[in-house]
Image (spheres, coloured by chain):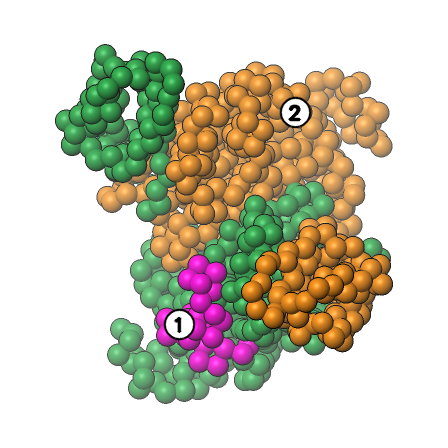
Chain colours: A green, B orange
Amino acid sequence: MIEIGLIGFGNVGQDIYRILNENGSLISKRIGRPLIIKRIAVRSPEKYSNLITDPSLLTTDVNDILNDPNISIVVEVIGGEIPALDYITTALTNKKHVVTANKEVISKHKKHFFKMAHTNGVDICFEAAVGGGIPIIRALKVGFAANKIKAFYGIINGTTNYILTKIKDEKKEFNTVLKQAQDLGFAELDPTMDISGLDAAYKCSILAAVAFKLDSQVNEIVHKGIESITLKDLNYATELGYAIRLLAQGKQLESNEFELQVCPSLIPLNHPLASVHNEFNAVYVVGDQVGEAMLMGKGAGGSPTASAIISDIIDISFGISQQTSSRNLETNFQDGQIKPLNKTMSQYYLRINVKNEPGVLEQVSLQFAEQSISIEKIIQKESNTNIAEIVIITNTIEHQNFIEVETALSNLKQCNKVESSIRLYKTL
Amino acid sequence: MIEIGLIGFGNVGQDIYRILNENGSLISKRIGRPLIIKRIAVRSPEKYSNLITDPSLLTTDVNDILNDPNISIVVEVIGGEIPALDYITTALTNKKHVVTANKEVISKHKKHFFKMAHTNGVDICFEAAVGGGIPIIRALKVGFAANKIKAFYGIINGTTNYILTKIKDEKKEFNTVLKQAQDLGFAELDPTMDISGLDAAYKCSILAAVAFKLDSQVNEIVHKGIESITLKDLNYATELGYAIRLLAQGKQLESNEFELQVCPSLIPLNHPLASVHNEFNAVYVVGDQVGEAMLMGKGAGGSPTASAIISDIIDISFGISQQTSSRNLETNFQDGQIKPLNKTMSQYYLRINVKNEPGVLEQVSLQFAEQSISIEKIIQKESNTNIAEIVIITNTIEHQNFIEVETALSNLKQCNKVESSIRLYKTL
C-alpha cells in the first residue's frame, strides 16, 4: 500500500481525490498495489467535511502529514511561495517524495529542492507546474533525454491564449474579452499575473531548468504581457499571414549563452503553434536528434492539473514498489470486442462522376432519401462536357448503410462511377 | 557501467552509435553512470568496420550478445517478425531488458513478450515503434496514466502524410508524388506497406494495447490506404473546410467494445491534426481527466527513431541504477549566461499611427534607413480622416536597434503614436 498526504484541498486537491476514487482500481492495477490518501491538511475542515466520505482524513495540522512515517508521498497543492517552501523542505528532510503543481515555489527554489531531494534519496516532481495536463516535463526528462535541447517555444498561459483567441474570433477588444473570461472562470478576478506574462515567466524558468539545466530566476527573464494587443493588430497579423500568441521562449546559443523571454509573438499561420486555440497550451521543442516536436493539451483546470499530479504519483510509486515490470508493461489485457466496420458510425464524403443531363441530381438525391440518409453538404459545379461531378457529405450513418447507398449509386444508369468515398473525422 | 548489445546496424543502429558518441557525456550524467555499446551483431561485419572506432565490437554471432552476462540491455533494430521474435524471446529468457523499434514483432507478439518480461523481471520498451521520436508510448503509460483513455487519433505514417501534403501543395497526382517521395527517401522502393495502411495498422494495434490494454491483431483492424486519393478530392475537401489525412483511430465505446481502424479521413482545417504536414506524425488523445491532448513530431528517420530508442535505454537505466533521484532531478546545473534583451535578434511588427499627409511614408521609411533596417513588408491603407495607419515588418535586427528606430519614430512630427510593436517567432 502506498499512502499519500494532501496539503490543500481546493479545486485541484478535490479533483485528485475524485480521480483516485473514480479511476482508483485502474491506477492501483497500474502500480501493482493500492494507493490511498491518508490525510488531507486544510485550514478549515468544516468547509470540506461534506465533500469526502471519511471526514476524519481532514486535519488542520500539516505535521500530521509531514511527520507520519507511513506517508511516503506528500502532495502540495496550496500554491504560492510561503508556506509551501517550508512544507516541501520539511517533507524532503523527512525523506518523503514530493509532488507539487506550484510553479512559483519550484521556479524560485528548484536548486535548493533538487539538492535536498538528492541528499535524502527521494523525488520532487512538478509535471503539473507547467502546461497542466501536458506531459512536457517528463518528455524533456526522459522522452527527449538523448538530445541536446536547442530551443523551446511555449504557449504556457491559458488565460492569455483564451483572450487572444476570443479577441480575434469574436471581434471584440481586450477589456470586453477579459471581463467575459473572468465571468467564465478562464481568468482570475485579479488577472495581473497572467496578463503581464509573469505566470509564463515562472514556467519559462522551470522549462529552462529541465531543458537546459539552467538555474534562472524570473527577474532574469524579460516578460511582456498582452495588455496592448488590439483587434487591429490581430487582423493585420492575419492579413500578413500570422497569428499572435504569448510565447515563452528559450534558446541555447553558442558557448553557454541563453535567450529566455516571454512576449507576444507573430507566428506563421501554418505553424502548429498557430493552431493552439482558446485555453489550450503547447510547447514546441527543438532537439538536436529528434528535430522539432510539439506537445499540446489543456494547460489549466482542476482535472488536467490533477491528471498530471497523479501521473507524478504513479511514476514515484513505480520506484517505491521497485517492480521493473509494472512500469513498462501491462500483463492484464482486458477482454474486449472490436466492433465490426459495418456497425461503426461516421459521416461520409463522396465524389461521384455522373452523366451531365437533366434530372441527374434528383436521381442521386433519391438514392440517399431511400436509405434515409440526409445530405449535409453538396457541391455540383457547372460542366461543359457530358460528364459532371457531384460531391456530397452525408450526415452520421452506419457503414452498412453507406455501403448500400454507394452500391445503389453505382447501379444508377446516370452514374459513371463513385470516384471517392472518405470518412470524416469525428472526436468522441 | 551499463553495457548494451545492438542487434542490427542499419540507419537506426548507426544513429544510436553516433548519438551515444555525440551526447554520451550528457546521457551518462543523466543516468549517473557510463553507458556503452559492448557488441554489435551484424551479418556482414566488413560492411561496417570502417564506420566505428573499434571494429572488434562487431560480431556475426548474435549469441555473443544474448549470452553475455555483462550485457543488461539488448537493442533490436533489424525489423520484421523473424528472427527478431527469437532474439527477443531469448533475451527476455536470459533476463535482459529489451528495447526495440520493431512494430511488426511487437504488434504480433506483445502479449507473449509482456508476460515473459514480467516473469523474468525485466522491461521490454518500444517507444520507437510508434511515432518515431514522439514520446507517445511513455505519455500513455505514465503521463496520462490517471486517465481512462477514451480515444486516440493518430497520423502515424510519415510516408502517406508526406504524399498527401505534396499532392495538395504541389498540385500533382499520387503517382508523380510517390515517385518524388521515393527519390527523396521518404518512401520505400516497395511502398505497399505504407500506402496500404498496413504499417499504420500495426502501430494502431500497439497504441490500442497501451491505451486500452487491448490485445488486437492487424487482421482485426480494417485498414484502407491512400492509393485512391486524388488532387480533386483534396481540393474539394479544402473547399468544404477539411484536410485529408490517413488516420489510425481507436475508440473505447460502452461495455468493452472498441473501434479500431485505419482510413483516410476528412479533418476540419482548424483541428490541430490538420496542421500536421509532410513527414510529421501526431497522436491526438482523449482522456477522461486530461481532456484532449496531442503529441507531434518526426515519425521516421534514423535520428528521431534512435532518439526514442535511447530514451527507452535511459529509462531502463534509471531502474537498473535504482537511484531514485537521478530519474527525476538534475543536481548538475550548468553555468550559463542569459543574453541581455537588447542584444537578442528578431524581426519586428510595428503599427504606427501617423498624420495623413503627403510625404509621411517617406519620413517613416527614412527612420528605418538611417538605422540600416530593411522593411520586409508594409501595409498602408487609404484613410478619409486626418489619421492614417502604417504597419511594418522589419528584417531581423538587434533589439537595441529596434528601440532606436521606435524612439526615432515616436519623435517624428508626422507620427502620432507607435501603437504596437510585436516580435516575430523564429525557430532556430
Q: What span is colored magenta in the figure?
A: A165-193
Estimate the spatial distance between the alpha carbons at disc 1 and disc 2, rounded to whole Å: 51 Å
Q: Is residue A187 magenta?
A: yes
In this orientation, which residue lies closer to the viewer: A315 or A321? Answer: A315
Task: Residue A212 in the image: state x and y as whole percent.
Answer: 71, 59
Checking the image for residue A310, the label placed there is none
Sort mark 2 into few (<14), some (14-19) or many (20+) by Cα contacts within 10 Å.
few
SS for callout 1? helix
Task: Residue A196 in the image: state x and y as whole percent.
Answer: 58, 75
Residue identified by numbered label 2: B185
Task: Residue A272 in the image: state x and y as whole percent.
Answer: 55, 48
Sort mark 1 into few (<14), some (14-19) or many (20+) by Cα contacts within 10 Å.
some
Direction from residue A395 to residue B235 in the image, left or right: right
Direction from residue A26 to residue B315 in the image, left or right: right
At 56% from the left edge and 32% from the top edge, which residue is drawn? B169
Q: Is residue A408 magenta?
A: no
Question: Quadrant of residue B70 in the image?
Answer: top right
- Whether A332 is drawn above or below A71: the answer is above
Checking the image for residue A180, the label placed there is 1
- The subunit letter for the residue under badge 1 reads A
Is label 1 in contact with label 2 (beta carbons under 8 Å)? no
Question: Quadrant of residue A415 in the image?
Answer: top left
In this orientation, which residue lies closer to the viewer: B360 or A378? Answer: B360
